[in-house]
């Protein structure tokens, strides 16, 4: 655990990792495999969804989390984060966090983009995302859904699968209702550009 000599700013990371749109190309090209955040960031989940530029980039697995002071960041840290030098990385951190100091702690989150198995029927139907992923993404954005539809999406995120969500709603015969909500939600996400029709082809 980091020493208390550096300023500690603790935050928790949920299912969603937000990045600036300008980082999308380097993430997709696997040049940027980390994100560096001010403070002690504690991920709550290993599997996350990355968003950038107002839409979803894809799913990723958090492979490592490291804490160090700003002054201890290295050239290697900068390269992994998609920058050409430590100086460039520090300039970006200062632009994002104007109050950050050299003795403050930052969190280096190393992630790996993953592609869903192509032989999964649900993944193919939903452009590479599982129904629970679609639900999590939709609840993050403002899209025109009814209160009942949003409740079904919330239930799906907790249940983790369409089958379990249907059981929670009263029985497996409710799968048709859940599928209808998911398909409507996916259509809205595609129309608003939050998801793209080729999302499943991303690395």
Image: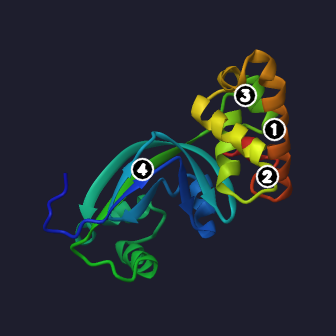
Q: Secondary structure at mark 1?
A: helix
Mark positioned earlier in the residue sequence (4 or 1)? 4
Where on the picture, by quarter, is residue 121?
A: top right
The residue at 42%/50% (across/down) is 110
Mark positioned earlier in the residue sequence (2 or 1)? 1
Where on the picture, by quarter, is residue 178?
A: top right
Kindly identify which residue carries mark 2: 189
Residue 61 percent across, percent down from the top left: 50, 41
Cα separation, mark 1 vs mark 3, equals: 23 Å
Dot 1 alpha-carbon crowd within 10 angstroms: few under 14, some 14 to 19, many 20 or more: many
The residue at 14%/60% (across/down) is 3
Dot 2 alpha-carbon crowd within 10 angstroms: few under 14, some 14 to 19, many 20 or more: many
Residue 184 percent across, percent down from the top left: 85, 43
The residue at 53%/46% (across/down) is 15
Kindly identify which residue carries mark 4: 110
Kindly identify which residue carries mark 1: 181
Where on the picture, by quarter, is residue 152?
A: top right
Cα separation, mark 2 vs mark 4, equals: 28 Å
Question: Does residue 134 show up?
Answer: no
Cα separation, mark 4 vs mark 1, equals: 34 Å
Q: Secondary structure at mark 3?
A: loop
Cα separation, mark 3 vs mark 4, equals: 25 Å
In the rendered structure, the answer to whether residue 59 lies left or right of residue 196 reads left
Name the colouring of the figure: rainbow
Q: Are marks 2 and 3 in contact (CB under 8 Å)?
A: no
Which of 28 and 20 lies nearest the eye of the viewer?
20
Q: Which mark is residue 118?
A: 3
């Amino acid at each position: 655990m980091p020493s208390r000599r550096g300023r500690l700013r603790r935050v928790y990371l949920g299912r969603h990792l937000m990045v600036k749109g300008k980082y999308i190309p380097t993430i997709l090209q696997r040049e940027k495999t980390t994100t560096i955040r001010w403070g002690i960031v504690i991920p709550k989940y290993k599997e996350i969804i990355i968003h950038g530029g107002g839409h979803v980039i894809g799913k990723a697995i958090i492979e490592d989390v490291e804490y160090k002071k700003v002054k201890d960041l290295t050239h290697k840290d900068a390269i992994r984060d998609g920058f050409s030098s430590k100086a460039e990385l520090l300039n970006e951190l200062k632009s994002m966090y104007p109050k950050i100091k050299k003795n403050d702690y930052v969190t280096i989150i190393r992630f790996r983009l993953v592609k869903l198995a192509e032989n999964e029927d649900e993944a193919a139907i939903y452009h590479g995302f599982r129904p629970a992923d679609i639900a999590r993404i939709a609840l993050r954005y403002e899209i025109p859904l009814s209160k009942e539809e949003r409740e079904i999406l919330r239930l799906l995120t907790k249940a983790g699968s369409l089958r379990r969500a249907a059981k929670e709603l009263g029985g497996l015969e409710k799968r048709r209702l859940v599928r209808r909500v998911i398909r409507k939600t996916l259509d809205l996400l595609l129309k608003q550009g939050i998801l793209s029709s080729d999302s499943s082809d991303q690395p």
